[in-house]
Amino acid sequence: MNPFVKTLRFVGDLDDEFYDDERQRDVWNEASAIGFQLFSWAAMIAAAVLAWTLDRTGAWIALGLLLVLTVVTTLTICYSWARGVNLYTASRIGRVRGFVVALIILVGYIGALVTLQPDLFVDASTWAGGIVGGLAGGGVVGAGIWYLRKRNARFEAEEI
């Protein structure tokens, strides 16, 4: 077990005897997933509202919430990858729920950036470059997910 997995197992207290009972473990895992999603939704919505309503203070709080949410989500996905489960190939990402989440996060980040914009972002061409860069980056991520799904489908077909 690598140090990353060991560290996150410690954080999650996964070696506690509580997890020895399979039903308790399953129910707690479901409850934890619900709690993670509740926190995610609350943080996203709060960030989107704060970024646009409370000036610079709200924008800084929104940015902090979004960055913490991004780090926690990334660590969660990386842990599952380290344990052999790839979220992007094992589930449908392009659901309406995913687009709503992306929109709320985008509203929060844009609100924070607009409010906290340095003098550099006054120029429209800089904003246009940021938008094009974001779209290009999103396209690369989408292409990567598509490729991984195709590759995993090919591996699964070869195993049969």
Image: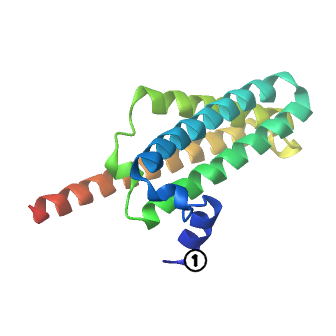
Query: Considering the image in quadrants, where does the C terminus appear?
Result: bottom left
Name of the residue lying farthest toward the bottom = 2
Name the secondary structure under disc 1. Answer: helix
- 37 relative to 145 in the view: left or right: right
Q: Nearer the viewer, residue 54 or 46?
A: 46
* Residue position for label 1: 3
What scheme was used to colour the molecule? rainbow
Q: Amino acid at mark 1?
A: Pro
- 145 relative to 112 in the view: left or right: left
Q: Residue at x 55, y 54 (%)?
A: 76
- Horizontal and vertical percent for residue 61? 83, 38
Name of the residue lying farthest toward the left = 160
- Horizontal and vertical percent for residue 20? 46, 59
- 50 relative to 98 in the view: left or right: right
Q: Could you classify mark 1 by the number of other residues whose Cα lies within 10 Å: few (under 14), some (14-19), or many (20 or more)?
A: few
Residue 14, picture quadrant = bottom right
- Horizontal and vertical percent for residue 102? 55, 34
Check the image and report above or below for 1 versus 107: below
- Horizontal and vertical percent for residue 63? 77, 41
- 85 relative to 136 in the view: left or right: left
> Would residue 102 be visible to someone looking at this image?
yes
Q: Nearer the viewer, residue 13 or 93?
A: 13
> Would residue 139 be visible to someone looking at this image?
no
Q: Residue at x 12, y 58 (%)?
A: 157
Q: Residue at x 57, y 72 (%)?
A: 6
Q: Nearer the viewer, residue 23 or 124?
A: 23
Check the image and report above or below for 27 versus 80: above
